[in-house]
Amino acid sequence: MLSIGRGVAAWTAECQHQFRRHRWDCNALERGQRLLGRVLLRSSRESAFVHAISSAGVVFAITRACSQGELKSCSCDPKKKGTAKDSKGHFDWGGCSDNIDYGIKFATAFVDAKERKGKDARALMNLHNNRAGRKAVKRFLKQECKCHGVSGSCTLRTCWLAMADFRKTGDYLWKKYNGAIQVVMNQDGTGFTVANKKFKKPTKNDLVYFESSPDYCIRDRDVGSLGTAGRVCNQTSRGMDSCEVMCCGRGYDTSRVSRMTKCECKFHWCCAVRCQDCLEVVDVHTCKAPKSAGWISRT
């Protein structure tokens, strides 16, 4: 459970990083499980991403725990032994290859258990996105090698497989979120068809969803939205973090704040960077709350 807890921390932080410039910023995760539950009860693109990244987080954490000898049930990949060959020639498997297959097997049993009890459309969608998340971690498994010989001549190579930083998985799933495919259930209830025939059929690596997302402009507990009132926006941006988009056209307040920053940094041989502390005055723009007195917070 300690390893799973680390996985939860990893995917939560990654979710918040990927959505940091969006109206729904994944911070509902820090405000209690009920808000997250509301997001997951929907079949939206946000729900698809959360299922994928959380499944990936469990794979990453369990696999890492295996390699570090923290779990009695697994160790380094037992299949990576003996001699093998790649484009550079022969090499010996050595070190500790990440046991990604065990991590995937564990995550499949642990994360998918609830969904396998149901046979409805949402369960099928969640199982698909869970699997896409697990596959994303394995996608970035890379071979690392060390040369042996006189002056690093590489007369002998020892290699092992290692997972990439979890950020690569997050970036990859973020692209899949932006390209997520809206689907509908087949008539026989065994799979999906695309809602819009102009789009391609989803692969096992794609994220899928049923429902369009709410705009997340106002606080609405029923959809897991905290709203954007008080969120910092970027006055010069033209993206999702712009004050126009982030504040949903409600306008924004500007306040001048002072903060300490590092400045006049210089490199000193060898090997340090020394900076001065400088006081910087900046304008901070925050979204206004809805003006209508009739809006419901539903908290």
Image: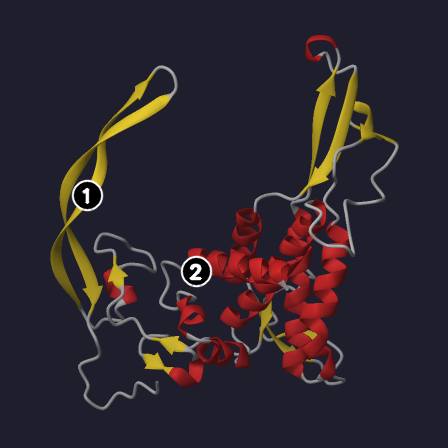
Q: Quadrant of the N terminus?
A: bottom right
State the CA–CA distance, disc 1 to disc 2: 25 Å
Residue 282 point in image, percent of width and height: 15, 49
Mark 1, residue position: 260
Residue 82 in the figure: left or right of residue 126: right
Residue 123 in the figure: left or right of residue 212: right
Label 1 crowd (10 A; few <14 / some 14-19 / many >=20): few
Mark 2, residue position: 16
Residue 103 in the figure: left or right of residue 285: right
**Residue closest to the eye, 32 or 49:** 32
In this rendering, is residue 47 above or below 71? below
**Residue closest to the eye, 1 or 183:** 1
Which numbered tag is attached to residue 8? none
In this view, the mark in front (1 or 2): 1
Q: Quadrant of the C terminus?
A: bottom left
Residue at (88, 33) in percent of width and height: 82
Indicate the quadrant where residue 111 lies: bottom right
Q: Disc 1 or 2, which lies upstream in sequence?
A: 2
Residue 170 point in image, percent of width and height: 54, 53
Element assignment for label 1: strand
In this rendering, is residue 188 above or below 32? below
Indicate the quadrant where residue 7 lies: bottom right
Residue at (66, 82) in percent of width and height: 121
Tell me if I can see residue 218 in this picture: yes
Residue 168 in the figure: left or right of residue 25: right
What amino acid type should be assigned to the residue bearing mark 2?
Gln
**Residue closest to the eye, 165 or 181:** 165
Residue 128 point in image, percent of width and height: 68, 69
